[in-house]
Amino acid sequence: MQINADSSGAAITSRPWPLTVAAILLICSLLLFWPGIASYDTVVQYQQLLSGSYDDWHPPVMARLWSILPFAHHGTAPMFALQLSGYWIGLGLLARTLGGRRAIALLAVGATPFLSGWLAVVIKDSQMIGALALATGLVGHFRLRHQPIPAPALIVIILCLIYATLLRANAVFSTVPLAMLLLARPQSGAARFVMMIAAIPAILLLSQPINHGLFGAEDSGVRRTQPMYDLAGIAVRAGDGTAGGLSTKAIEALRQDDCVRPLFWDSLSATPACQSAIKYWEKAPIGPLYLQLAVAAARHPIAYLAHRAAHLNSTERWLVPLHWPLAAPPARAEPNDLGLANPQSPLIAAWQRLAAWLTETPLAWPILWTAAALWGLWTSLALASGRTKDSAGNSARDLALALFASALFQEASFAVISISSDLRYHLWPMLATAIGWLILGRSPLRGRRGAGLTIALLLLCGGVARFTLPPVPPHYAGL
């Protein structure tokens, strides 16, 4: 047994049992959900793998990796095993380092039904969580013991971060703060913040030639969805579509058919009238389209901010009705003729029903986890400002700080870069926040009264909204 100290001075015990429990949880997850659940996105990517023709609507890095794995043509099993293995190995390593009650709490968080239920779905978000959990676990395993990261582990960490970055358009907001952990001699807080801000747009620009050049993905038009959604939102709210080339008739059609909704951008193609109104943008060059959005937002800032605020509220799942959609993980595979079968365990339906029930509770409100991450960031910064010669304690604060920053940068990105309110987009920020607080352990809490009042207010307003706002349609077509 090896003993170090955390940021609060408490002992960090290193016992092997958390790794054993993590291995058992991995085996149970594999047996329960084997060979993984195929969503609509999974089916599309598997079709690309079989045809050898890739586009950028779904991450080409995921389909390319899938294509080179053993038994790739046998369905979802290779990718399913990959994401679950990364997830539980990462959590197991970190739990072993933390030890005691914190290890139990961390493994319990990992097994939470709506987290483990989504990890059963072979989709880019689950791949991202698996990669980042493994990277975090490896970094924490060595840094919390004040040990240098060996070269093989460092290579795995870098590969996980690169892979996670290429899985989502806005994943860079999560991965860049974590990448700061790889600095052998961390810079000052201000220097690290400047490095993050500079790195994010650079990596966003670099991802395009990687997707289209290195991975040979064709342009699917996915990059147009953000400016199309925002331009339509501005035009409907301001009644002026000149910046985006929309006529008065097109704006009226968007309003008449309720084509712009906070929940997601899908309603823009819900009716022929909606499709006709935005047809002009579907083939527009990417650069000029974003320029039109910048002009429209500058001309009508209130309309733009109101549109983005409505969507942010929707995706943060705060002032919304009960049963807000796009939350629960599926229990069955998307119907397909590619041989992607359903898992056979009779327990899956019950497990995913439990996950669906939990998504209706405050545990699945991203807004609450954002508040918890802000509180954690404040506490971590206060602890970091009082650094001591306790290297293990400083390492714990650095790791917690990076996790809270990863969560908050990701959540902040939804204010500008987001077109759908799926809960799965928020699962990594939720997990990162939980891990950050567990790493802090019994550190002195700062601003408890203010944080408590904020969380209570968020709970009260969110609870009232759920029981007073009109119910949502039960099926996708009604949304």
Image: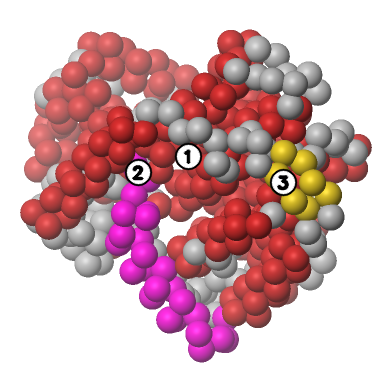
Say the numbered circle drawn on residue 368. Answer: 2
Residues under labels 2 and 3: Cα distance?
29 Å
Q: Which of marks 2 and 3 is nearer the N terminus?
A: 3
Q: Which of marks 1 and 2 is nearer the N terminus?
A: 1
Q: Which residue lies furthest to the right in this view?
A: 151
Say the numbered circle drawn on residue 12. Answer: 3
Residue at image point 26% right, 56% down: 324
Residue at image point 41% right, 39% down: 372
The amino acid type of the residue labelled 1 equals Val
Bin the neighbour count of mark 2 within 10 Å (Cα to Cα): few under 14, some 14-19, many 20 and up.
many
- What span is in magenta? 343-368
Q: Is residue 293 left or right of residue 345?
A: left
x and y, in percent, of residue 39 in the image: 50, 65
The amino acid type of the residue labelled 3 equals Ile
Residue at image point 58% right, 39% down: 440
x and y, in percent, of residue 232 in the image: 25, 32
SS assignment for the magenta stretch, majority? helix
Residue at image point 65% right, 71% down: 25
Question: Which structural element holds mark 1?
Answer: helix
**Mark 1 or mark 2: which is in front?**
2
Q: In which quarter of the image is residue 341?
A: bottom right
Residues under labels 1 and 3: Cα distance?
46 Å
Say the numbered circle drawn on residue 236. Answer: none
The amino acid type of the residue labelled 2 equals Leu
Question: Which structural element holds mark 2?
Answer: helix
Q: Quadrant of residue 180?
A: top right
In the picture of the structure, the residue carrying the numbered disc 1 is 222
Q: Which of marks 1 and 3 is nearer the N terminus?
A: 3
Number of numbered discs present? 3
Q: Is residue 455 left or right of residue 429?
A: left
Q: Can residue 364 be seen in this view?
A: yes
